[in-house]
Amino acid sequence: MVVTLQREKCIGCNYCVEMAPAQFQMSKKDGKTVLLKSVNTKGFHTLKSHDYSIMEACEQAVKACPVNIISVKET
């Protein structure tokens, strides 16, 4: 599965961290979320994982995000 975050558009609401704390945390530097263990490519932070146990929490983060900057896709 692939989780993608458009970090620059983050408003710092913290909902993703509440839904999936193992994958997201808030940056103390700028108050925006960080997708843990991700790779940044032109503003898109991407986490590729074979651990489908995190999928439900990540999907809840997608639904909770008010600015729709998180996506989850099965591979």
Image (tube, rainbow, N blue to C red):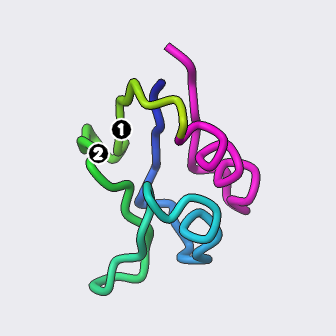
User: Up-down: is 51 above or below 54?
Assistant: above
Identify residue for label 1: 46
Magenta-tinted stretch: 54-75
Q: Residues within 10 Å of mark 1 (few under 14, many from 20)?
A: many
Please report the residue visible at 64 percent of the width from the left and 62 percent of the height from the top.
19
Residue found farthest to the front: 53
Could you tell me the amino acid type at mark 2? Ser
Please report the residue visible at 36 percent of the width from the left and 38 percent of the height from the top.
46
Label 1 and label 2: CA atoms lie apart by 5 Å
Please report the residue visible at 50 percent of the width from the left and 65 percent of the height from the top.
21
The front one of 54 and 75 is 54
Q: Secondary structure at mark 1?
A: strand
CB under 8 Å between callouts 1 and 2? yes
Q: Secondary structure at mark 2?
A: loop
Marked residue nearer the N-terminal end (1 or 2):
2
- Residue 34: name its quadrant: bottom left
What mark, if any, has residue 11 been given in the picture?
Answer: none
Residue 8 on image: x %, y %: 41, 60
Residue 27 on image: x %, y %: 34, 77
Identify residue for label 2: 38
- Residue 53: name its quadrant: top right
The front one of 64 and 57 is 57
The front one of 47 and 11 is 47
The front one of 41 and 39 is 39
Could you tell me the amino acid type at mark 1? Thr
Q: Relative to 60, is 69 on the left or the right?
A: left
Residue 63 on image: x %, y %: 75, 50
Q: Relative to 45, is 15 on the left or the right?
A: right
Q: Is residue 51 magenta?
A: no
Please report the residue visible at 44 percent of the width from the left and 59 percent of the height from the top.
22
Q: Relative to 40, is 32 on the left or the right?
A: right
Residue 6 on image: x %, y %: 46, 49
